[in-house]
Image: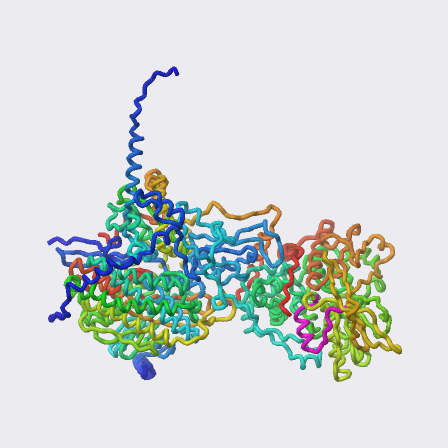
Amino acid sequence: MEEKKKYPKPSIFKPLRHLKYLFRKPVSHPLDTIFTEKNAEYLNKNNPFRKNKIKNSVPRTAPDNIRGFHVNDWEKCIGCGTCGEICPTAAIEMVPRHDLPRVAGELQQRPVIDYGRCCFCALCVDTCTTGSLSMTKEYVFADSNPDSFKLMPTETWQDQEVELGYQKTEVTDLLDLKRVEMEHIEPEERIKSYIEVVRGYSKEFAKQEAARCVECGVCTASCPVQMHIPQYIKAIWEDDIEGGLKQIYETNPLPGVCGRVCTHNCETSCAIAQRGEAIAIRWLKRYIIDSAPDEMYEKIFNEPVSEVIEAKVAIAGSGPASLSTAYYLRGLGYHVDVFEEKNRPGGVMSYGAPQYRIPDYAVEKDINFIKKIGVNIHTNTRVGTDITLEELEKKYDAVFLGTGFFAARKLNIPGSDHPDVMGAMDFLPITRDFARGAIKLDEINVKKSVVVVGGGDVAFDVARNCIRIQLEKYGKADVKLTSLETLDILPGSDDEYIEGKEEGIQFFLGNGPQEIVVKNGKIKGLRVWKCTRVFDEEGRFNPTFDSEQETLLEGEQVFFSVGQAPDYTFIPESLKDKVTIERGKVKANKDGQVEGLDWLFVGGDIFRGPDIITAVSDGHRAAVAIDDYLYTNAKKKEQSEYVKEIREAIRFNNPDLALKPTRKRTLN
Amino acid sequence: MTNSINNLELVKELVSKTTTILKEENIDVQQLAFEVNTCDIHHVLSVLKSAGWKQLSYLSAVDWPDENKFEVVYILFNWDKPVYVQIRTKIDRENPSIDSILPIFPGAKYYEREAHEFFGIAFPGNPDYEKQLILEGWDDIPPLRKDFDPSAYSDRKFPSREYPQDYSVTDEKNHSLEKRAERKARAERLRTGGKKQ
Amino acid sequence: MKEMKLFLGPQHPGMHGNASVHMFVDGDIIKRSYLLPGMLHRGFEKQMERKLWVNNISLIPRVCVPEPDINEMSFATAAEKILKLEVPERAHWIRMIILELARISAHLMAYGGLGGPTGNYTLMYHAHVDRNLILDIFEKITGARVYHQYIVIGGVRQDLPDGIEEDINVFIDDLERRLVEYRDLGIDNASIVKRIKDTIMLPEEVVWELGVTGIGMRSAVNKPYDVRKVVPYARYDQVEFEVPVSDYSDARARLDIKIKEIQQSIIIIRQCLAKMPEGPVRVKPDRGQSMRWTVPKGYAYAPIESSRGEFGYYMVSNGGTSPWRVGVRGASYPQGLLGIEKYLPGTRIDDAALWVDTMGICSPEIDR
Amino acid sequence: MLSTKFTPKNKMTKAEIDRKWWEVGDYFRRNSLWLLMYCTGCCAVELPPSMTSAYDMERLGMGPMATPRQADILLVSGYLSLKTLRRLIYTYEQMSEPKYVVALGSCPINGGIYHDSHAVINQLDQYIPVDVYVAGCMPNPESVLNGFVDLMEGIKQKTMNGWKRYHDHFEWYKENQKNSLGEVIVHDEFHQ
């Protein structure tokens, strides 16, 4: 450092050139682009020399994507709380708002933001499931009271309509709106056999799908049994199959079945479905069941429940409602006998839904566990013929009826008495037995061309079964499906429609059948009129037709899938007048206890309907109600701590009535 | 840099000649990581320094409570042969101590003081390592250890605001949210280990 | 003569940021000195471990306040190194524009900061007005003036808004013209030069002893030791720029390099705007919703050239939803702590503020 | 009217005279506020634009002041770590009265993003009284300036009396300071 650096000789005049800025326009922002109106008013009044200088003052308008204070569109917001979950500063708290209506897919709560925490990162906006939350261009807020910084965002900011600033775009979105592709067997392949259509997730894909869940739990309220959906999805993501299995069995004893054929109201109300594809909740449940080894099941009830309560319950039928009742009663500590008329238990699971949707091994896996915990299932025993209801009443302390809607219903139109006209519930059990190999192909009466009437899932089951049988029998398929409802109000699920279409069903939607045309003792086809409306203004079923638009759907056979009917022949004369039956369903209280007959409980189709998962919930409620009815008078009721715990869990999880989600059609 | 591959080879050769390498990682084309025995640290660092890696970019520690170890990290850099070299070594978590590298890199002085302050690692050889640097009047375990919970500490020492207004509208008869929370808590209890994320 | 203790900061107009230089002086000459850091300690490294990968973007810009973007960039690159994630091409170029604008703004702030210790307030006013224009551009691009939270793992948060190229071009053209004025007012101003030349020298040996990087190092060793050149990140290997150097490191030389670097940054931004391709700007690091993003196990160190030197995040991931450990290598660590302790003694009291200013000492990144 | 007692018209009590003088003082004070230049946290980075030509705070009669004894406003710009809080209390107690505290950003209100940090306090008004809070993280210069005008208006309306509260509740403030800081004054190698 001895020699000092020589710099070019600096000038003393050069800096003076800056004097030119004296004559330039000032760069300062004018006062009227800084202050709010209130503060401008103060400044105007305060200075005696510059009175009313600042006019129409508004703080500078911010650019388009500025992250200012929040607004929340309450019409759109569903109270899922994802904003609060992601908030890095824990500034967002969800507060209960019971003044909001309680509907499916929404929670009665809304976010409140603490601006003493908020860091204006807008992650809440980016992750909002509905897109209701956004940020404004407002950024000025000062106050002397520190308590005034906790604000509930509504559509307005400080009661003013304001311009929106930062809003989420496709790029900034932090949710994963696309479902992880589920592998399906290709249509050409699957119609050749009864192989299961949906392959199920692999571990990797299941974890990816599970990672999409935001754990908001809006789904649970619309699930009839209120399963712990977010928690078991999280268990999958954390690779904790055992925990997931335990969580599932808390509320659903038929998860293998429900993982395949549930009506999945949960997915309809899923928060992700607000803007994207719902989480594949049903398939994730199936993933847990498929990947849980048999040994793991022992950990659900890790010691056999010996009969702790000396009371016996008989159950008529072995469908979902009956098996659910049996499972929970067994868990509560009762002796349970199930009577089934067919030679396999399962009811609609074994004889209704087709094999390609729900294979026998899945049904067996569920039922085996129910058997394993000590439920006795007596097959080939029909209540009413093999054993009467009166006998059951005498031998048992309580009786549960879950006999279902197993009779076919037909439309009363000309020609419907023809032998080639079949009802769905007559046909489906045959196909199921055929798929099992119990019936030969020749014994099935399916003609070369077929017309199916109905738009529900069952109609699709019939149609797709027909395709499979026709292909095997004749080498080619010809199935027409007609329903009153057009596609937008079709009761069947989207999956069924898509898959049915892929498999070659010809659709004639929006038509009302008028006559089955019979010539020379053979069916020629079905004459239909265009349906102009299905429901009247009050929303009641009241179809009208336009006779001008008439079509003849050609076919040699007609299947009616226009609903099922109960069969109450097993109810003896002595009880007939005590049981009230309204519109085919037994009248009972909320839990299924028949009025006037305290020992008799009902559930499933004959009580509430219409799907498997509701039947399971009926079963759970009935089991708890039966426990209430029997427990106080039971002779022996000492329990170990472990059994007490199980009983407590079952009673705790007793489901409320589900909220019905309003369905959004994604197809067009 | 065109010869970055050669530089990587050079470092690998240099380190493998000097010491036994427990683990080697190629992080990218200009970054290498070696895990070595604690006793070899000084040797490796001085060899690297004399080979041109004379800038100590970073020195710190990582806590691995499951293994009951602290991992001390040294990152060296050579501006002429641009390769970042991470040298790591694991030391015991109980009474952690590692000799100071001040004789090799004088610039390590404050890094070591900080590592002592935040992890409690002793650096014998560094005259000032026990003096407090960033914290003042600290009265708990060193804060960057995994078993220190800042949230609990904050709750204990610094009260949070309780706002008077809560915006809630509640209905005595409506228990849907409470029930939901109870169910959630129950389901959470059923979890069995699994992989902790 | 009796030794006397003086504090420079934390509350002192010549001090940048909330830190304190303790000096023991004899007359005007500093005998002993050290920095008292920690006034801005927030426990960042601990906080990062406790936040999700996605949440961290709202935390990290706060590590260094005058130039927040380098934190985002360093964090994102470190995570991308562990993830082995390919960032979309356009995102690289946008990142470079942001980083260079941030560098200009930090340099302007430091250059204007010279006004404090030397009493040249005109310079400070001019520099801050220009810096304010950069903040306005940032606000248009990212939605916030200072904490942009814009560079994220996998790219940038959103694409550039329409018409921003025009705004940037107008600004950098204007700034380029004004650079001459900045020289006139500052380093070529006779009164200032007299004050700053040959003060607080940094000899080459000291550089290696301290481990100083950045402008301090380049002004002393006369070699283009710039992370952008030596270990190029983003697309710095595809733009042409010079690294200004000097072989005589006094306060004036360092400020001279600052002005030259602003010039180079302008050149880089021009090239970026010209070469930037169209296309996507962001890829998600993982499937699923953001709160369940994970980064595989691994270690990475991501060095970035900040306005003060090599700035880097050392990141350790355990495969979870949050980082296991993030260590911050503050660029001003060596000159701020060891430099003040070892090298300030022997200089005059009034030069301490110049050291803090020209070496670029950013107290929040020392304290974290 | 029975009263014959004569009250001199122009005689004011001492308290009234004091009040009048305060009003006069307040008028000048609020039009010439001096801001203590103590950058305690990140929000300080928005102060240079507010002070320099871009937003030009001097149009409000405000300016930076280097020493606490001559300053009117203590600006708490953002979060406060424990170490700073200690110095802030020294500074606050050194300032001459009347003195006002303006807190910028989320952090002094309820901890902000550092609410769970081991080094940062959550509520500033536990330790010293605060007169105006400005929301934002960080607040734009516009918000800062609007906050200052709020303060002026408050001075006019005599609602900004945090410094009186500090006198009245001195024990309470000291108690809180002690609970969080341990000891307000430290003795270590840095402060021999």
Residue numbers of the magenta segment: A490-511
Indicate the position of residue C93 as horizontal and vertical percent values. 38, 73
Front position in the image: B41 or A58: A58
Q: Is residue C235 left or right of residue A238?
A: left
Front position in the image: A333 or C350: C350
Residue A335, quarter of picture: bottom right
Indicate the position of residue A111 as horizontal and vertical percent values. 51, 54
Residue B64, quarter of picture: bottom left
Residue located 32% across and 19% down the image: D6
Q: Is residue B21 left or right of residue A492?
A: left
Indicate the position of residue C292 as horizontal and vertical percent values. 50, 66
Please determine whether, in this image, residue C92 is positioned above or below residue C112.
below
Count of marks, rendered view: 0
Q: Is residue A547 left or right of residue C52?
A: right
Residue located 36% across and 44% down the image: A42
Q: Find out whether residue A581 is within the magenta segment.
A: no
Q: Is residue C260 left or right of residue A294?
A: left
Q: Work out which quarter of the rendered image holds the N terminus of chain A and state it.
A: bottom left
Indicate the position of residue B155 as horizontal and vertical percent values. 42, 52
